[in-house]
Image (cartoon, rainbow, N blue to C red):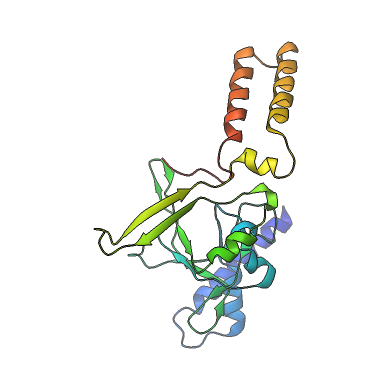
Amino acid sequence: PEKAKIEQLYWEISQQVVLSFQGQAYIPEEIRKLEDSLGDQYLCNFSVFQSLLDHWALGQLFPIMPVSRLDERPSREGTLVDITCDSDGQINKFIDLRDVRDTLPLHSLKTNGNGLEPYYLGFFLMGAYQDIMGDLHNLFGRVNEVHVLLDPDEPAGYYIEEIIEGNTVVQSLSAVQYDENEIKRQMKAQIDEAIKADRLKPSEGMRLLDDYERGLKEYTYLNIGP
């Protein structure tokens, strides 16, 4: 408890030190580094190893910016972390006007009646190379893809040619030699055993099995939507 209190006090003091330099013409490098260390971490629904492999492997920088709330000035600074369990699944270097910065200007998240509002970021100039090189680390598969073609004859100036759905859970599992029928059989056997031992009601067991089989057919990433 004492260590936690000391750490909390350290970050509170650091925050006040950074605030005391706001508006000054010259900010020492040490204060800039301290400000970067106070940045937020935004958890993003993607895998660095699948979608931005060259950033992890080579340190290549890609243009990244919010595509939500473009009429609002960002009020936060943060780094981006993915939903893999790997500590390397993060982005903490960003393209600046003349240099590289350690944080990205972001907006505070908003809530509505359904919880947090979706907040979208754009990752640009990735191209087919990242798509081909993407890795199944943590079994996060290929992402959903939309082919958009520009056409001046269309009212909006473009049209969607094709939508390609990303990998499902069972597709990613099959890539590492798991058989769909076998894992379903094993799950059913465990549920049957739990029902016989009165640890689970039959109706609960069937509902659990239905949820499990439905989940195998779903996207490997979080489904965020209405």
Q: Would you say 140 lies left or right of 165 here?
A: right
Q: Nearer the viewer, residue 173 or 88?
A: 173
Judge by depth and name the residue closer to the eye, 194 or 147.
147
Q: Is residue 208 found left or right of 64 in the rendered image? A: right
Q: Going by the image, does 186 lie left or right of 108?
A: right
Q: Say which of 95 and 3 sits in front.
A: 95
Q: Quadrant of residue 133?
A: bottom right
Q: Residue at x 56, y 66 (%)?
A: 39
Examine the rendered structure and indicate whether residue 114 appears above or below residue 10. above
Give coordinates of residue 15: x percent, y percent: 55, 69
Question: Where does residue 176 sit, x and y in percent of width and height?
Answer: 73, 44
Determine the residue located farthest toward the bottom in the rendered image: 26
Residue 69 visible, this angle: no
Residue at 38% over, 60% down:
149
> Is residue 5 in sight in this rendering?
yes
Q: Place residue 170 in its image quadrant.
A: top right
Q: How many marks?
A: 0
